[in-house]
Image: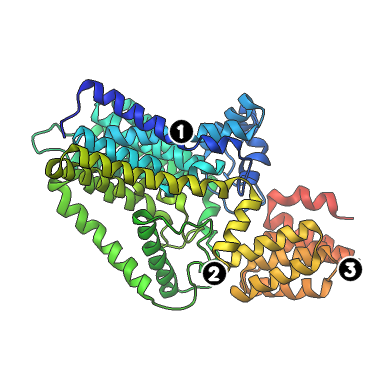
Amino acid sequence: MAPATGLDRLAMPALVFAAAVALYLPTTRFGFVGDDFRIVHGNPAAHSLAAAVRAIDDPYWPRPSRSGLYRPLTIVSFALDWTLSGGRPAWLHLVNAVWHGLAAALAVVLLGRWLPAGAALAAGLAFAVHPVHVEPVAAIFGRGDLLVAVGLLGAVVAARGRRWLLATGCAAGAMLSKEIGVIAIGLVLLDDWLQPAEARRYPAGLYVALGVLTLGFVWIWHGIGGDATTDVAAAFFGAGTGQRLSVALTAAWRAATLLVWPSHLSTDYGPQVIPVGGGASLAAFGGLAVTAAVPLVAWWSRRRAPALAFAAVAGAASYLPTSNLLFPSGVVLAERHLFLAVLLPAVAVGYGAHWLARHRGRRGAAVLLALVCLGLAARSLARLPVWRDNKSLLLALVVDHPESFRAHWWASEVFATMGDTAAARRELAVADSLFPGYPHFDTWRAGYLLAVHDTVGVAALLERVRRVERYYPSAVRTQFLLALERQRIGEARALADSAADWFPWDTAWYRERVP
């Protein structure tokens, strides 16, 4: 495969961009789904640029959620789209596809330093159509993952072009889109390290600027979105370090298999899709092997195959903060968190295409590349309808993973909305049998039982929540409503007064309801 010409440097990213966008055009017929309703549809800050600016110092997750986080640029992007489209989901889906196309095009440009033209094109096409990308592109709430990928890759490409201000701006945009953007300084440093020995190094001033920017962002993030540090996934409630690492390593193994063979995708990897409470397993040892292999592969390939070294480190660095290996996070595993990790199998496809072209001829390499990319694209297209609406999402999860605690919880919510009390109670009981004692679930279940006037069941569930976490905002709300239901006005007023101290942001809610 020949090195890239000037025309190749323009045509290849354009081709990959077009392929990435075209693959996701069917999503323009989809609606809002999952967290889209809380982050976009039901979030006033996402409905106008003025509201987004006013909410610049608000957490990403609207109150009373304690999930925190700080992603103002993502909210601004939603607000711009809402203003332009009047809130039509088709437009928001199309913009997601465009951002994905930009990320894929930047991947081609980035890899073009190390790979011949054909190999870079092969890697870019594999990156564009990989099925792991379906979740962050097909779900509007995946916008942050797309923006941060564009920002991170753009920062590296800009630094290579010695456009220091642009590189710093891209890094800032990445951080303000999603907190994983803090790895920008690491990726720029990695790219600098992988240069040939005779190349000019990036100036110290760039690293100073990126370092100051990163520290400033982390300080702001903790001040505004720091509640996220206390928001841990259901699997880690009450879990010790050993149990957390067992789950985290099992998830790491699952993540690795998704990158290599994405046949069993899921919208949920919580209990018991990823088994919880079973101790060490073969999958956990597999995850340990994968975790240990990443730095070894990066070191071995730093001179032999620098594109592979970059992909391995970038993928691991982008996954590490939510891997639960260092500390518990709010998810066990999510496919959107593997967006940059897809660089690793994509680079493998690129190197494989280059090897075949040298040893078996270009035609054979082109045929095999076409088969691989068509297979990946077909899997992605088959997966897209899962994200059409909440009904499709739930049905897919229940059918694919009946062991999912969250699937039965979501099913209970659907039956409750339909007024089918018996079915809702049945699903709640199944969910509780799969994973008992999770405060958020118990609080929701208590709220539902209160709605059907089962006050005895409510009291028992709230007591179970208090044993795990005494000051749980949603549980205190439910306790307040229970006191009103029982006509215990004095108790309700006392709870409202206490809630004003515990949760100042919730004062208005209590004030509207207290007698």
Q: Identify the element where label 3 is drawn.
A: loop
Q: Residue at x 54, y 62 (%)?
A: 400
Q: Which residue is mark 1?
A: 22
Task: Name the quadrant of the N terminus.
Answer: top left
Rendered image quadrant of residue 39: top right
Q: Amino acid at mark 1?
A: Ala
- Residue 408 picture location, percent across and down: 64, 65
Q: Amino acid at mark 3?
A: Arg
Q: Which residue is mark 2?
A: 237
Q: Residue at x 46, y 49 (%)?
A: 336
Using a 10 Å C-alpha cutoff, classify the residue at mark 2 as few (fewer than 14 neighbours), some (14 to 19) or many (20 or more): some
Rendered image quadrant of residue 125: top left
Q: CA distance from mark 1 to mark 2?
A: 42 Å
- Residue 411 picture location, percent across and down: 68, 61
Q: Earlier in the sequence, mark 1 or mark 2?
A: 1
When the figure is inspected, residue 232 is found, relative to residue 25, above or below; the finding is below
Q: Are marks 2 and 3 in contact (CB under 8 Å)?
A: no
Using a 10 Å C-alpha cutoff, classify the residue at mark 1 as few (fewer than 14 neighbours), some (14 to 19) or many (20 or more): some
